[in-house]
Image (cartoon, helix red, strand yellow):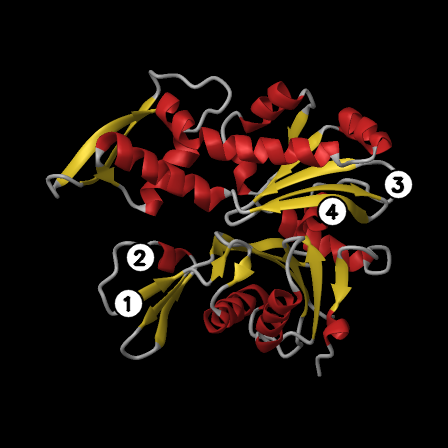
């Protein structure tokens, strides 16, 4: 039996699903390298724990930026390690479907394909993120009905209207999980003159975000370095402050959904009003985001079941639909690979 692997190649996390088994791996897209020996020390969760804590000779790298590959060699190493983990050390080379943002260029697509080929795949397919997210959320896209998906990842937010197995209109913006973390770092730096690390910012985002009705009494203690004294310091931060920190970025996502709806054919907008908006990706779990979109745009918003694994599940589901998914799904034979 041939093995099929679906990969959600995310800026923050790489999620892999195997046919018949479901999601087998969900780890940070991070790799740690010893600069002196050029050896890979750790990948995934182990490497993530080293961010901001490693000695000078250990480089902790995120080889993917804004949904695309920024470091070819490291991405190949990362995919290779994870494919081995997911598939086990088998002789049969797997077929791989990789999901990519909807506005990826040919050059960026080639980099993704080469990374998968070098990881030992016999056949590689690319699928657009919105299509994979819809499949993973279990939406029936075959009919002439409009569905709107908002996939908020680590590096990009993809918003798309899908009907009859294809993307009708779409937008992709760089405002996503990593930019929200950076906004929290900036806010704390400006307000408290305190420098915090990206892991602390991510923890604050996950635990203290309330975009619908933030409360000043809900608080959390975090630590960092005082920029004036240069000494360690702890502060108390509230939901209200996190809302202030994230407000601009979150409303940029909401405005992108609004401008997409303005460009969508009216018949499909009617369908979207009935079906609601589907939120997928890690950003879907931001506290109160679904209610905020509902209140601002007047369209009901549903969070997909297991939003982080949604795209990876969709990539595996795509194998059963290879002939139907004419749009947003490419066989890499198009790239003239040997």
Position above or below: 111 against 181: below
Q: Residues within 10 Å of mark 4 (few under 14, many from 20)?
A: many
Q: Which residue is mark 1?
A: 58
Confirm or deny contact between disc 3 and disc 2 (CB under 8 A): no
Label 4, label 3: how far apart the Cα atoms are: 13 Å
Confirm or deny contact between disc 4 and disc 3 (CB under 8 A): no
Q: Which residue is mark 3?
A: 143
Asked if residue 283 shows in the view, the reply is yes
Label 4, label 2: how far apart the Cα atoms are: 35 Å
Q: Which residue is mark 4?
A: 135
Which SS class for mark 2?
Answer: loop
Confirm or deny contact between disc 1 and disc 2 (CB under 8 A): yes
What x and y, as percent, mark residue 312?
63, 52
Which SS class for mark 1?
Answer: strand
Q: Which residue is mark 2?
A: 50
Q: Residue visible at 72% across and 74% down?
A: 335
Label 4, label 1: how far apart the Cα atoms are: 40 Å
The total of numbered circles placed on residues is: 4
Label 3, label 2: how far apart the Cα atoms are: 47 Å
Label 3, label 1: how far apart the Cα atoms are: 52 Å
Which is more toward the observer, 40 or 66? Answer: 66
Position above or below: 309 against 261: below
């Amino acid at each position: 039996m041939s093995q099929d692997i679906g990969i959600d190649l995310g800026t923050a996390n790489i999620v892999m699903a195997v046919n018949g088994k479901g999601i087998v791996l969900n780890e940070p897209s991070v790799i740690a390298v010893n600069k002196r020996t050029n050896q890979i020390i750790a990948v995934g969760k182990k490497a993530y724990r080293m961010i901001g804590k490693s000695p000078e000779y250990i480089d902790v790298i995120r080889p993917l930026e804004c949904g695309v590959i920024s470091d070819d060699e490291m991405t190949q190493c990362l995919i290779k390690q994870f494919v081995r983990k997911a598939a086990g050390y088998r002789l049969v080379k797997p077929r791989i479907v990789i999901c990519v943002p909807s506005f990826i260029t040919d050059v960026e697509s080639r980099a993704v394909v080469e990374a998968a080929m070098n990881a030992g795949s016999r056949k590689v397919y690319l699928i657009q993120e919105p299509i994979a997210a819809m499949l993973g959320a279990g939406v029936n896209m075959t009919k002439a009905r409009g569905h709107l998906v908002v996939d908020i990842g680590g590096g990009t937010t993809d918003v798309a209207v899908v009907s009859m197995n294809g993307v009708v209109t779409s937008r992709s913006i760089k405002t996503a999980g990593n930019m929200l973390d950076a906004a929290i770092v900036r806010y704390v730096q400006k307000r408290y003159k305190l420098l915090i690390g990206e892991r602390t910012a991510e923890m604050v985002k996950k635990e203290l975000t309330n975009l619908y009705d933030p409360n000043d009494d809900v608080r959390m203690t975090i630590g960092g370095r005082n920029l004036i004294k240069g000494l360690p310091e702890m502060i108390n931060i509230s939901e209200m402050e996190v809302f202030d920190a994230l407000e601009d970025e979150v409303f940029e996502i909401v405005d992108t959904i609004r401008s997409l709806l303005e460009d969508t054919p009216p018949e499909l907008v009617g369908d979207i009003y009935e079906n609601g908006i589907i939120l997928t990706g890690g950003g879907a779990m931001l506290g109160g985001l679904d209610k905020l979109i509902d209140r601002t745009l007047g369209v009901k918003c549903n969070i997909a079941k297991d939003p982080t694994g949604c795209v990876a599940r969709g990539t595996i589901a795509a194998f059963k639909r290879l002939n139907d998914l004419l749009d947003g799904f490419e066989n890499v034979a198009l790239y003239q690979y040997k």
